[in-house]
Amino acid sequence: MSVSLQRLTRSAVLTALALALSVAEGLAPLTILVPLPGLRLGLANLVTVYALCRLSGREALLILVARCLLGSLLGGNLMALAFSLTGGLLALAVMALLLRLPGLSLFGVSIAGAAAHNTGQILAAIVVLGTPAPMVYLPPLLFCSLVTGAVTGGVSTLLVHRVPFPGKV
Amino acid sequence: MRSPAADRRRPTLWDGVVALVVVALAALLVFLLRPAGGSNLTAVITLDGVQVAQYQLDQLDQPITLTVDEGTYPLTIRAEQGRICIEHSDCPSQDCVRTGWISKPGQQIICLPNRLIISLFGSEPEPFDAVTG
């Protein structure tokens, strides 16, 4: 298989996986337990972490954008697209930066990613609503991102070690 | 991309630092956003940036039900003495209904699909020079 075809297939499979994860997550929303708008586990972020660690930043970005666009076609609207894109891009940027630092593990990277995702969502909400009112939700969301980030960090550690080199199969 | 983080299996001390930074930012925001005190509780309801209603919650004698159907999804707001909630909404996410009752200054209910915000403000009671009647 040629290299570019291999990359394309790899990205397509991961995009489908990310999409499936975010739809599955939507079926059992965390907000039933904790009534906090915007709160979610961030399972699709696993794919971003994996792509950043095992593929490249460019592929991670492509997978993220494709996932957000397809996700809004599946069940969301234009507003949902704005939210997932702003949050996702900010999380991707922060995690790509932190992955270059020595001394961190995927736990810290995922926590920072979850916090960045929440911040991006709130920023999008502020722009959509035109008032700084949604800012009130940011502190509780940040506290929750410690838990959700640690969970996805643990899962992504497993994922990155169990599935080390895609494409060399 | 080769990343040292991808090779580690256990959390490091620096992960703790990241978590602490997140907590510190959240605490700072809580401090910056703390509501102004006051015993009067006012609920302001805005739809797409326009104020549609305002209630003095602590002075309500009987419950009020307000139906807002100018937005994308009709919803029903219920106000009682000292508290307010969105009783029913036709919006898909239902986050606003799940938020439940709010009763403290600074709290809010936001229904994003409708761009509707209910905010609670605290204010000092207005000084009356004389009460007649």
Image (cartoon, coloured by chain):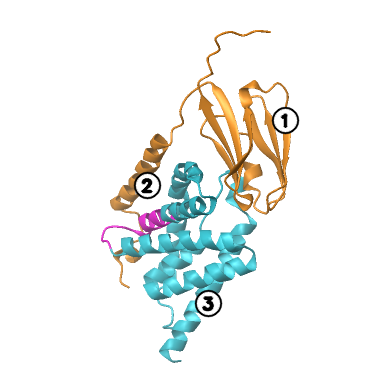
Residue A139 seen in render: yes
Q: Which residue bears the numbered disc 1?
A: B64
Q: Quadrant of the C terminus of chain A?
A: bottom left
Disc 3: which chain? A
- Amino acid under label 1? Ile
Q: Is residue B32 above or below residue A87?
A: above
The front one of B19 and B94 is: B94
| Pointer 2 or 1: first along the chain | 2
Could you tell me residue B118's position as x and y percent? Answer: 60, 39
Is B119 contained in the magenta span? Answer: no
Q: Which residues are magenta?
A: A101-114
Tell me which residue sits at (58%, 63%) in the image: A78
Q: Chain of mark 2?
A: B
Instruction: Determine the CA span between mark 1 and mark 3.
Output: 53 Å
The x, y position of residue A27, in whole percent, is 64, 58
- Which chain is drawn using orange? B
**Residue B22 numbered tag:** 2
Pair 1/3: label in front: 1
Helix, strand or loop: magenta stretch: helix
Does A87 appear above or below B52?
A: below
